[in-house]
Amino acid sequence: MINKQHLVAPSILSADFTNLESAIKLLNNSEADWIHVDVMDGHFVPNITLGFPVISQIKKHAKKPLDVHLMISKPERYLEEFKYAGADILTVHYEACTHLHSTIQRIKSLGMKAGVSIVPHSQVLLLEDIIAELDLVLIMSVNPGFGGQKFIENSYKKIKQTKELIRATNSNALIQIDGGVDANNARLLIEAGVDVLVAGSYVFSHKNPKEHIMQLKTLKFSKTE
Ligand code: DX5
Ligand code: ZN
């Protein structure tokens, strides 16, 4: 039974990088709530994606909040830069921060919403002493680094544990899921307690991405695909 309206955050990682402007305009005119931007540094994860100049350009065209997911080591080095580039929500990885509490306080004092992500092998309980401070918990349902990977089924357990931890600590954090989200699991994920669905390849590998965004928003999927 679903009794809340969830959010959809398409990941532009799977968009055509030679024509980002049209991807952003498409998202502006879709049911997308946020625009998910994946930043990778080739150190915390094996891949390298984009940085401040590209985020600033995306921001020029975006009419929706930029949900910036940092898959970089020591993200505390660049919080101001991400703010000035246009991030509205800034998510760092638990595994990438030595002084996570202080990093979260700085993100919030810069006027951004603060998120923390955990990779598939990290336990939800690691967030026990920080979750009350968070606006967002991002559960990675693939190993971060690449789009188009297979969803890890153990993520359902982690969503439920996060939900319980949020309740126990009176946290206002939203639960976001990222990796392998598609027509097969979106409804189950929302039922398990997810508030924000991130989807890259499911949205942008389709000839009409707006249709797939709509499907993720309404949780009504056409049977022909
Ligand atoms: C992966 C990124 C994801 C990625 C998801 O490390 O964090 O946001 O774009 O892509 P899909 O939806 O294709 O798994
Ligand atoms: Zn992401």
Image: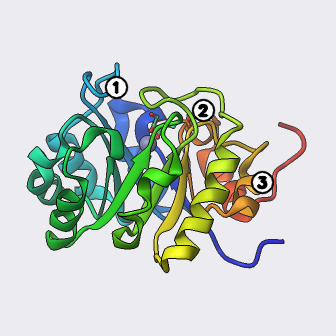
Q: Position of residue 69 (x, y in %)?
A: 35, 47
Q: Secondary structure at mark 3?
A: helix
Provide the residue designation for mark 3.
Answer: 188
Question: In the rendered image, which quarter is residue 107 located in?
Answer: bottom left
Q: Secondary structure at mark 1?
A: loop
Q: Is residue 195 visible?
A: no
Q: Position of residue 169 (x, y in %)?
A: 48, 75
Label 3 C-beta lies within 8 Å of the nearest ligand 1 atom: no
Question: In the rendered image, which quarter is residue 41 located in?
Answer: top left
Provide the residue designation for mark 2.
Answer: 205
In the picture, which quadrant includes the N terminus?
bottom right
Q: Mark 3 and mark 2: span between their CA atoms? A: 22 Å
What is the image's colouring?
rainbow
Residue type indicated by callout 1: Val
Pointer 1 local density, CA inside 10 Å: few below 14, some 14–19, many at least 20: some
Pointer 3 local density, CA inside 10 Å: few below 14, some 14–19, many at least 20: some
* Left or right side of 50 for 211: right
Label 1 C-beta lies within 8 Å of the nearest ligand 1 atom: yes
Verify CB contact (< 8 Å) between mark 3 and mark 1.
no
Q: Position of residue 64 (x, y in %)?
A: 39, 65
Label 2 C-beta lies within 8 Å of the nearest ligand 1 atom: yes
Residue type indicated by callout 3: Leu
Q: Residue furthest right?
A: 223
Q: For this rendering, which residue is in front, 207 or 119?
A: 119
Label whose residue precedes the other's in the sequence (3 or 2): 3
Q: Is residue 110 visible?
A: yes
Provide the residue designation for mark 1.
Answer: 45
Q: What residue is rendered at 16% in x and 43% in y?
A: 52
Residue type indicated by callout 2: Ser
Q: Position of residue 67 (x, y in %)?
A: 37, 56
Which of discs 3 and 2 lies nearer the camera? The answer is: 3
